[in-house]
Each structure stands twice: as structure tokens, then as C-alpha cells.
Amino acid sequence: MSTQQGAVAPTVADAPPDNWVDRSAPAAIRPYLHLARLDRPIGSWLLLLPCWWSTALAAIAADAPYPDPTLLILFAIGAVAMRGAGCTWNDILDRKIDQAVARTRARPIASGAVSVPAALAFLVFQALIGLGVLLCLPRFAIVTGIASLGVVAVYPLMKRITSVPQLTLGIAFSWGALMGWASVFDTISDPALLLFAGAVVWVFAYDTIYAHQDREDDAIVGVRSTALLFGANTGLAVALCYTLVVVLFAGALLLVPAGLFSLLGLIGFAAHLRWQVSRLDIDDSARCLALFRSNRDAGLILFAGLSLDTLVPSALRLIFP
């Protein structure tokens, strides 16, 4: 894999300042790390969290002493690899659009730092890592994971044909809400389906916030998004979506049934979403980006509650046998 002759790998606009890729990575591989978004790990977190929620929820349902650590590690590796592969595929298909949008014109393919053939080779490399992770899971989970590939493949095209491409992204990014449960039980039950549905709406809402960074450029180049669809009504739309997320997640917890710590985790998660809505200003790109990124913290609050619902009872059983 090689970069195009004489091309450089500029810092991408929405990368965190002083990120480790721009600060420390060797110059030769820096464009590929940018291509995989390793300078912006938030996407990997947001892909990973539904996997971890599902694993922890399944542990509660199975009365396990803790969420399976092997699954948690495998999902973490897979999330980084598949998020990178998805971003690489997206940038290959969107290279002309990216050149016309201020926030994305510095992406490696759009800027000329990485050629399309090199990007395709890098895509295969990342996909093979993801495949290796998938093959470590039970057979039913392998089939479930493979079923997501079609959604991942078509997502970059959705912004050209629908005003709600965030819905397709939500399905792709929420697939992990099925994977943890499938890995534990070799099936997909109603709690996992409710968790998946809630995660889809969560992604739909937070990516609508994210899309407001590009709405002027998107309108010029003819790209569609929920930011353009909702416009000034975005705050109301996001608030309604976040409310539905909490209702769906509450349904999943009730069906398991989960305990006090899961409920507290959901309350903390809901409070964080409410805070996001109160802070939303669609005309402030920096704030939209910060609120989008803050969903990692919201998701970790929920994961902590789910995990404590297994860890605390198992600890108490050890103390009071």
C-alpha cells in the first residue's frame, strides 16, 4: 500500500487536537490511520457500545457473574477493525463529494494522500481482521454478523437517494445489540430486539446532531440528511427520538428482567440525553460535534449499570455464601 506521489496527509478538520496519529504516528502510515479514523476513536466507541450493552444484558438474563470478558475484548477489536473498514469504503465511494465539503476535503483519498487501489487493499486488510474476530464467535453469531454486511455496504449510497440516511447508519451501527445476545444464547430474543431498536433510534438522533456540521455544504452538493430534513425542528426531533430510545431500552430491561443498577444506569443515560437536548445549538458546529462525541459517555453510563447488575450480586454471593 502506498500513498500517491508527492501527496501529504493533512490533519482532518474534526479530528481532536493533538491526537496521537498526528503527534506520534510514522508519516508513512499516517494517511491510513486517518482513513481508518484512528485519530477519531469516537466512531469505534459508538459502534462498540451496543455490543457491550447486549453482552451485559445477556449476562443478566443468564444469571452470569459478569459480562463475558472474552466477548467484550473480541467486540472491541472487531469494532475498531470494522469501523475502519466501513470508513474506508465510505471514503472510496464519497471521494468526489468529500472534495466539495469543507470538513471532509482533507480526508486521505479526497486529498490525494491515498490512492483508490491502496485504499481498497487497506479495506481488505481491515475486513480480514474483522473476519478473524467473527470466526471466534459461535456459529449463530457468525451468521448474524455476516447478515449486517449488506447494510454496511449500501450505507454510503443512502445520502444520495433518501433524506434519512441516518436510519441506515443506525441499523449498521446498532447491529452489535444483537451480537452479544446471539453469542451467549445462540438466538435473538425480544430483549435483544428492543435493545437493537432503541440503539437504531439513538444513532439516528446523534448522527442528526453530527450532520448539522455539513448542512450548508450538503445542500450545495445535493447530499441529503436529516439535518436538512428537520432544519429548525431538529431539537424537537432529537428530543422525541431520545425519549423513544429510553422507552425501548426500558422495555428490554423489563423483559430480562434487569435489576436496580440497570435501572440507575438507564436513568443516568436518559439524564445525559436530556442534557444534550438542552445544550443543542444547530448553528454551532463545534457544539454539535461535542454533543455527538458525548454519546460515548452516555453509553458507558448505561453499560456500567448493566454490568453492575451482574457484578454486585455475584460479589455479594461470595461475601455471604
Image (cartoon, rainbow, N blue to C red):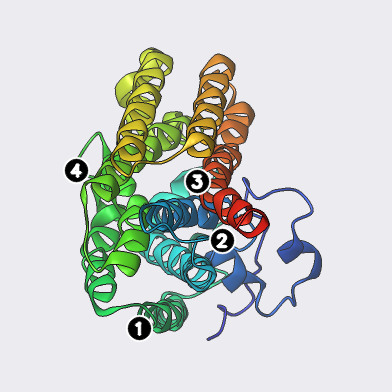
- The amino acid on which the numbered mark 3 sits, given as a three-letter code, is Leu
Of labels 3 and 4, the one closer to you: 3
- The amino acid on which the numbered mark 2 sits, given as a three-letter code, is Arg
Of labels 1 and 3, the one closer to you: 3
The CA span between labels 3 and 4 is: 38 Å
Tag 4 near tag 2, CB within 8 Å = no
Closer to the chain start, of discs 4 and 1, is: 1
- Residue 271: name its quadrant: top right
Q: Which residue is under mark 1?
A: 135
The CA span between labels 4 and 2 is: 25 Å
Q: Which residue is under mark 4?
A: 161
Q: Position of residue 69 (x, y in %)?
A: 54, 69
- Residue at image position (57%, 70%) is 113
Of labels 4 and 2, the one closer to you: 2
Left of 278 or right of it: where is 21?
right
Label disc, if present, on residue 306 of the rendered structure: 3
Mark 1 surroundings within 10 Å by alpha-carbon count, few (fewer than 14), some (14 through 19), many (20 or more): few
The CA span between labels 4 and 1 is: 34 Å
Q: Residue 278 or 58: which is nearer the viewer?
A: 58
Label disc, if present, on residue 218 of the rendered structure: none
Mark 2 surroundings within 10 Å by alpha-carbon count, few (fewer than 14), some (14 through 19), many (20 or more): many
Tag 4 near tag 1, CB within 8 Å = no
The CA span between labels 2 and 1 is: 24 Å
The CA span between labels 3 and 2 is: 29 Å
Q: Which residue is under mark 2?
A: 37
- The amino acid on which the numbered mark 4 sits, given as a three-letter code, is Ile
- The amino acid on which the numbered mark 1 sits, given as a three-letter code, is Leu
Circle 4 SS class: loop
Q: Height in image: 91 above or below 300? A: below
- Residue 142: name its quadrant: bottom left
